[in-house]
Image: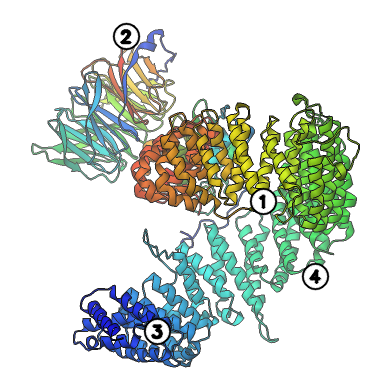
Amino acid sequence: MAEAQDSLWGLVEEFVSGQQDSKATEVAAGVKDGAFTVLQVVEALGSCLANPEPRTRGRGVQLLSQVLLQCYANLKEKEVEVLVVFYENRLKDHHVITPHVLQGLKALSMSVVFPPGLAVSVLKSIFQEVHVQSLMQLDRHTVYMIITNFMNNREQELKSLGADFTFGFIQVMDGEKDPRNLLVAFQIVQNIITKNYSLGPFVEELFEVTSCYFPIDFNPPPNDPHGITREDLILGLRAVLASTPRFAEFLLPLLIEKMDSDIQSAKVDALQTLTAACAVYEQKELKEFLSGLWSSIRREVFQTASDKVEAEGLAALHALSAGLSRSVLSPDSEDLLNTFLSSILQDCRHHLCEPDMKLVWPSAKLLQAAAGASSRACLKVTANVLPLLLEQYNQHVQSSHRRTILEMTLGFLKLQSKWLQEEDGNGLANFKDPLCSMVFSAVTDPSTPLQQVAVKALTVLGTQQGFLSSGDIDLIVDHLTRLILEETDSQSCQAVIDSSGSLARVHPAVFISRMVPQLCSRLQTVPMEGTDDRGSAIPQRTVWQRCLEALAAISTHHSIVQETVPILLDHVRQAQKGDTIAEDVVAVCKSLHQVAVLCQENAESLCYYHQKVVPCLLSITVLAAMQDRGNAADLHVLLNDNVLTAMASLIISSTTHLSPDLLSSSVSQIVNLFLDGDVSILKENSFPSKFLPFQIDGPAAPQSRLVALFMAFVCSLPRNVEIPHLSRLLQDLLSLSLAGCCAFAFTSAAKCFAGLINKCPAGEQLDNSLQSASHKIESGLEDESRRTQAVTLLTWVTKALILRYHPMDGHLTNKMIGLLSDRDLGPLAADMFCLLVSDSPDILNKACHADIRIMFRQRFFTENVPKLVQGFNAANEDNKPNYLKALSHVLNCLPKQVLVTELPSLISLLLEALSCPDEVVQLSTLTCLEPLLLDAAAILSVHIDTLISKLLCLTSSPSMAVRITALKCMLALTKLPLPMLLPYKQQVIRALAKPLDDKKRLVRKEAVEARCQWFLIGSPGS
Amino acid sequence: MVGSSQLENANPLIYQRSGERQVTAQDEDEQLHDRIDDREIFDLIRSINDPEHPLSLEELNVVEEIRVKVEDKESTVSVEFTPTIPHCSMATLIGLSIKVKLLRSLPERFKVDVHITPGTHASEHAVNKQLADKERVAAALENSHLLEVVNQCLSARS
Amino acid sequence: MLIIFSLSPQTRPSMKDSLTLLSRLSAHPDSRCWFLAWNPTGTLLASCGGDKTIRIWGKEGDTWVCKSVLGEGHQRTVRKVAWSPCGNYLASASFDATTCIWMKKNNDFECITTLEGHENEVKSVAWAPSGSLLATCSRDKSVWVWEVDEEEEYECVSVLNSHTQDVKHVVWHPNQELLASASYDDTVKLYHEEEDDWVCCATLEGHTSTVWSLAFDQSGEQLASCSDDKTMRIWRRMASGEEQGKKDPTWKCICTLSGYHTRTIYDVNWSHLTGAIATACGDDAIRIFEEDAGSDVMQPTFSLTAHMPRAHSQDVNCVAWHPKEPGLLASCSDDGEMAFWQYQRPE
């Protein structure tokens, strides 16, 4: 024990006199171990604390405080009590000691056994003895932390201080300048208010001490290590200012003043703060300032040059109107909402009558912002505005004017449907007839823009349950059908189709009885390419495609799905005869695919869809494959790559969301079909021969193409659905993937194998399959006729393993990197790197329940980029482009933040890649660089010279895409710090004159943007 | 600028903006040569900001596609612009902005002429003569105040 | 007034080869080159431009090389430069409203004084043949005459406010103290000293737009002017006797060359060695005209003897005949380039 004591004395001596800071940690360790107690430390410090030299006393307190900071959790209540008394006394000591005292108090304030009542005493001492704003930043921060800790743990005790606490804090923070401290101080004030500490008579003082920072004007210095942004401070202050209605009388005049200033950021901040404050304000706070606020907001929306200010102005008006709507009114008081809306109406209403003047839209937006805040506001405004708009529509005959009026009306109708759902009290009832006649007249107007708005309005009216009569709904559906079949403008027609989709949800029966039969009969005539289109404004083919799209789009209700799916399937079946072109079958499949996506929302529809569609597609394709004579030039249309790919994606969409119960029955049937030729799942049962898709040679070769459909199904199953005969299946897939069949079949087999491997649980089965895959790949790479197959399989398996962090992925990736120096396979392997890291559109993605670890790309990047760089350096000139291409594919898929941090090590390679003659490498490097240019100023500054000259050089590349992207990079460069750019300004402007005369318009467009921006840099007014 | 000074006309007539030019298959074809046409020139100037209003020259109908003539082969461009009112004090500044935008955006082989639409401005001749004098245009662009205003007209709206 | 429209502006067959390019070089990269001036002996050529610099060029072997760059004198575009008749001084006029006087010291130039006074852009500067007078003109509509004493002090002796618009160019008579100025007000004015004061003694009206430049012939009896109206005019001094009752000699337009130029003519230069007139035009071309042999002195006819359609890739701003080598012509353009040509009168 005495030994410990001695060592303690020694440590204290070395810390205090020897100035060895590290000794504090040793003392703390001693306390934690129980070698000595904190009070013994105080004892050991005794003489030094009584030393006449303040610095020595300070050193002593410093030691104690540092020890406490490390062991406050070990303290007992009694110890804390003694220490608090000690420290409070020390606050009265020399000012050089104060910072250390504060550190100690901070440590104590974190103790859970802090004795009751002492918090008040500590705070009183601090308020009394310490002039906080003459301390250093760090020490001021300590004071804020002590207060924060007490507020978190001792709320009730602090509240017993009453308004003295608030006043004390006001004095503490008055004059604070440091952004780090301000953030904490703002948080404390916010807590004082929201946790109901007493403000007493100090409301205005508390407001003053915070509002003096408004609006925040702070630009963090470059390379600021604290990472505090202007936005952080703005939000911190706003939370204070907008936290209580008691600030209203001070805040609102301040906001009006700032809205009236010329500084745009001040306007935006004032408007946003107003919006925030309105969340807690009611009529009584707002009353006095309403007219001032309105005239400022009106001015900002009427006259502003900035969309941002306009949007914030509208948001503030919306919030004001919402605040006014919230108040409970006594019967005799004036309803301010009503008065406020009246003044808005008075100022804006007449502008609605001038549809070709500038203020029409700002006025409509203001009215809609105010009306959108509550049902009362909505009722009042629409009741006032709608009759006016209806009247104006009839008075103006020009279609552009009518369109503006109808568009405004539409805005108000949308608000109506938001606020006034129920039929009674729906302000629209009175206007139903004039509204209908306006919209129905507009929908038949020859002007396309007017028609487009009319369709939107019809949709809004039609979706309001019970508003329109059934006759009106019939009429709407007839109009929509007519437009789908006759509208010449394709964008407009798309809008009609979208509207039909939303309306069909509400009125399925009308669509089934009126639209479906028309579309169906129109679909019967499949037009040939180049059909005679005379006498019709739109090509027959376009109409045919539109009917398909429309049938899919309206499949938003189960009853409609039951109508549309059989119709679409009939059209796929027609291809069995073999005289349909692939493009048409693909179009039908795409339509079916869209139906599948819509069915995902509804389990009943999806189940119907799956059971109806999957067996049907399998039947007709199996039949087609058996009839096919295996002559590549004369492939059955149903076996075409694009057709099968389209079918695969609809199978995926119908499988991913289906319930596992339903799936387990179909999975065994489908596996049996493919493995054993068991056709029980198929609708037909008279097949000319046996279905043997995995048989590699012989007459059944075309059947192997159908593995694409099999892949779609088994690879999109949820991971908990068990797949029967998995081992055999994997073996068959492996064999097929290395077979000499067509690329479509072996690629599908490789993908399917990869898709299954990705989800296969770790264990013997997986290991065995991977082992045999690895062997097959090895031997495939040796066999001249199987090398492409082997690379394809290698890529897909590698991808499957990378996604799930499988330990073997490194081995396979190394193999792929190795292939980059293969004379024949190098370019193919380089291209395959794109596949490895990019999102896969069909299988092996999240939707297909693949096993994907987050950050797999970063991991891949960290592990493999150094190898690629090394490989590049070692490679001979012929193979270098392969490495660059692989690398640029990898970089392109990586999140920007990761790239920015890695850029220093890669930048010289990227610059080299820009000189690589391969256009794919150039393009992908440029695409990768463009978003980085902004965030990598420091790294780029060293290379700016090379970068600019290489980019300028690429602006005359033979490839249009390279020229365009190089110019986009030149534009992105202009955001870099000015001093980096100015030396190059004249040279760049001169060089960019050349692409202004590019032969391609799209290139010239980019050149113009880049060059004009370079003119603006460092020039006044930009 | 906003809110501090009174506008000559706070509620001017506004016109529809033409949409972005549709990209055609020909535009995408690497082999074909796209000639510079009137629409392309119009697209360069239609989004220039009016010095006074928060609106583009197109929205104010100061520029129109039919008043743009380009001969790619002859390397000539001629643009007529129509001030909103016959005594518009900003006419020279608008013309200068159009001219500068075209000089910065067109290949140097082009001869660019910018005029006021005949009969639409009181000082038509004087403004036209100034805009045609390249020495005065060059001197104006060395005047930082003028350059600032022109650059503002040519900057993308915030 | 006599106006002679050229009957056939087409070229003679041999005209094609009458002007040949000797060399071309980038004089003011990333900028435009506004003006060129030969020193009196023709050993040096000064150029100036939008990059705010003046460059001095000398011939080394067959090539022209930049001997020095005078970059410090002006804050804005240097519009024109002029050599003193002794060849030891160079004056430069700038958009920064000043005129600098540079003294040649061995192979270097030093700015010895800056003439201030014009309200805005100085557009042109010219030395009188005696070397003791200097004229400047500006957008401020005035022409200033400065006197140089032995101590190289410059004093403004007269401010002439005769023009109603910017004054674009000033030029002195080759051997008399007679000054001519060209203006945006479409006129040319002439000035001489009368009882210790400079006065405007003639106004030449006829051009229908800005007059950009002027050039006297070798005798000083004829003056060529070029304009934004796409024409060139030749004016001739009429002795007092020829126009009765007037004390001052008057100037008459004796020839108008129109139909040749398709855009503004920015410069005209009259060779004092060969009598050929060169023009610099906004249509990128250089053209050369010569008086037809045996044409009437009072109604001369001129023929286009050389036409170089794309002499530069942009506007040609200036043409300058070499003072000693007949037919050697320098030109410069908005493209920042300078070119040297050899002219041979077609037979």
Mark 2 is surrounded, within 10 Å at the Cα level, by few (under 14), some (14 to 19) or many (20 or more) other residues, namely: few
| Residue A444 visible, this orientation | no
Secondary structure under the numbered disc 4 in the rendered image = loop
Q: Marks 2 and 4: CB-CB under 8 Å? A: no
Q: Which labelled disc corresponds to residue A760?
A: 1
Q: Chain of mark 4?
A: A
Asked if residue A132 lies left or right of residue C125, the reply is: right
Work out how far the residue at label 3 is from the one at label 2, CA to CA, in angstroms: 112 Å
Residue under numbered circle 4: A422
Asked if residue A325 lies left or right of residue A807, the reply is: right
Asked if residue A487 lies left or right of residue A1009, the reply is: right
Q: Nearer the viewer, mark 4 or mark 1?
A: 1
Q: Residue furthest left?
A: C150
Work out how far the residue at label 3 is from the one at label 4, CA to CA, in angstroms: 61 Å
Nearest the eye: B147 or A590: A590
Residue under numbered circle 2: C293
Work out how far the residue at label 3 is from the one at label 1, CA to CA, in angstroms: 55 Å
- Estimate the x, y position of residue A515 in percent, counting from the top left: 86, 48
As drawn, C107 above or below A220:
above
Q: Marks 4 and 1: CB-CB under 8 Å? A: no
Tag 1 or tag 3, which sits nearer the N-term?
3
Q: Are the residues under badges 3 and 1 in a single subunit?
A: yes
Q: Nearer the viewer, mark 3 or mark 1?
A: 1
Mark 4 is surrounded, within 10 Å at the Cα level, by few (under 14), some (14 to 19) or many (20 or more) other residues, namely: few
Residue under numbered circle 3: A108
Q: Nearer the viewer, mark 2 or mark 4?
A: 4
Secondary structure under the numbered disc 1 in the rendered image = loop
Q: Nearer the viewer, mark 3 or mark 4?
A: 3
Asked if residue C100 lies left or right of residue B61, the reply is: left
Q: Chain of mark 1?
A: A
